[in-house]
Image (cartoon, coloured by chain):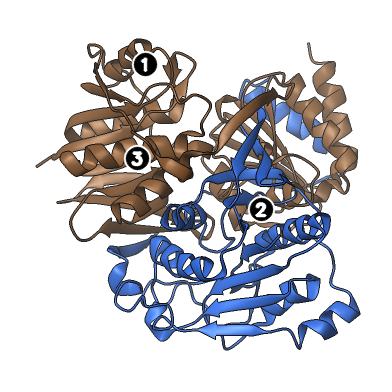
Chain colours: A blue, B brown
Amino acid sequence: MNVVVCAKQIPDPAAPQSLDPHHNLDRTGKLILDEADTYGVEMALQLVDRAGGGEVTVVSMGSAQDVAGLRTALAMGAAKAVIVSDDSLRGTDALGTAKVLAAVVRRLQPDLVVAATESSDGYTGTTPVQLAELVGLPSITFAKSIEVNGSTVTVQRQTEAGFDEVTAPLPALVTVTAGVVEPRYASFKGIMAAKSKPVEVLSVADLGLEGQVGASGARQTITEVVTADARQAGEKYVDDGDGAARVVSFLESIKVL
Amino acid sequence: MPLDTIWVVAEPAGDSLTTTSLELLTRARALATTVVAVSWGANADARARVAGEYGASTLYDVGELGGALPGAAVAYALAGLADATPPDAVLVPTSYDGRDIAARLSARLDRPVLTNVSGLSDEDGLVTEHQVFGGTQVVRARFTGDGPGIIVVRAKSFAAEPAGGAPAAVVAAPSGDVGAVGTARIVSSHVEERTGPQLEDATVVVSGGRGLGDAGSYALVEELASLLHGAAGASRAIVDAGWVPYSHQVGQTGKTVKPTVYIALGISGATQHMVGMKGAKNIVAINKDPDAPIFQIADLGIVGDVHKILPAVIEAVKNHG
């Protein structure tokens, strides 16, 4: 079974973030594999293991100058990576990104596409299902577990009340929520092997998408960025045995107790 | 000049509609002359009464989906309707199914989608507001080009207020044959045991974070929540670590809550978390790091060991007369 995992290299969330003069997220610093994507990579690797054959391909869009984030996925066990990188993609929105990823998925013809529910930098959360629609795949979002039996994928999908068991015929797309599997740490052997695994770099022209994606295709514009009203800090105490009493009397003062 | 027509994806909740759907209907009727609800499931008449009460004149009913996930079927119905008479905008609740519908509709109509919207105004066209960097900055955006914009709105962005309107007229909106994309089917539903109110509706929310130290300590968070008749929430860090399910997550990628009091236990206050809870009327924080960002927005901050203070709070609340 062949699985494509959509992954994104993002600025380290631990570092301070800012918007550039074009109101795009500043991505000039070091990029890492979005932690949200590591769960999908882990699930995909497990599914391929259980199927007893096939491979995991990581598909991404963004700058190919630094692919350390994709190497992280390769070190975990993915077989190869494809990244679409092109200056004309600057300012691409979620639908444009989905068009780019869809073009790659159509080439690779996987049995299953796995993606995170949303990225940790943009949080748009629509790209995977837009991709599914463009390719013509059924989709199951918010998966906490994925099983494949023959040509059917069965997913436990989060709901407000608990979870639904949902099935779809392959090929299909599934998005996973964080925390549902323990992503493996890359072994030393894995890290060494990742250095020689193929990372294919494609351009917009390679995919025949000239003029369809990029800032001009985004059709939405940021008009301004304003500072929000700040909430004022209240009282702060260092606990010297009276911490609990202070909490309780605060709750009394607002009539919660 | 108000907008002409706004469609609202009105998600069924039993015979009624979800709270976020009602919030969107309320906002839509202030922005547009005509508000249309688009809904699905059994008993359309009951939902049309609710939609009408909140300002919709028409309810397009996609009908029962026979176990299919709503995403494809509802998006295809919307796309068919929009081809015939495009609205100015389609408002969609941020929810599990809402995002599926918005994403498929966007690809189907080849129109962009704006998500995480927390404010909407009409300034010679719709302007959306999005909180970024923990809500310290607000990005304002608008669509360009022809065709309806698709707008996915966070819960609690607006108050839901009935207007006492007559039931909306029910119009069938068949989605037709959606083909392979509509083949995802719900086989069975599992309800996890839950006591107390839903996270979004609770007047008291008690949340735990990485500072709890281990998954087992989350039981104390749940105990205090239960004693205060509230709901238990969580930071993304402990959801990612697998301590608690995603449905408990408060923040940018999780739920937005606006309780009377939000009690943050061992939560440092990452920007991702703050977006989901800074609208609380009161915030209490206990954290051992005096420089934790959560203290910058807390009404009462206690710098100390949550493992000492929390059991004492629980004991005091139990004995409270």
Q: Amino acid at mark 2?
A: Gly
Whole-angstrom CA distance, mark 3 to mark 2, is 40 Å
Q: Residue at x 31, y 12 (%)?
A: B49
Q: Is residue B118 visible?
A: no
x and y, in percent, of residue B116 in the image: 45, 49
Residue underneath mark 2: B269
Q: Residues within 10 Å of mark 3 (few under 14, many from 20)?
A: many
Q: Is residue A184 left or right of residue B259?
A: right
Q: Chain of mark 1?
A: B
Which residue reaches farthest front? A150
Whole-angstrom CA distance, mark 3 to mark 1, is 21 Å
Q: Nearer the viewer, residue A116 or B300?
A: A116
Q: Is residue B70 visible?
A: yes
Q: Amino acid at mark 1?
A: Arg
Q: Amino acid at mark 3?
A: Tyr
Q: Nearer the viewer, residue A119 or A212?
A: A212
Q: Is residue A200 left or right of residue A203?
A: right
Whole-angstrom CA distance, mark 1 to mark 2, is 39 Å
x and y, in percent, of residue B137 in the image: 44, 59
Residue underneath mark 1: B47
| Secondary structure found at label 3 | helix
* Image quadrant in which you'd find residue A215: bottom left
Q: Residue at x 37, y 40 (%)?
A: B75
Against A98, residue A133 (above or below) is above
- Pointer 1 with pointer 2, Cβ within 8 A: no
* Image quadrant in which you'd find residue A78: bottom right
| Secondary structure found at label 2 | loop
Question: Between disc 3 and disc 1, whose residue precedes?
Answer: 1
Q: Chain of mark 3?
A: B
Residue underneath mark 3: B76
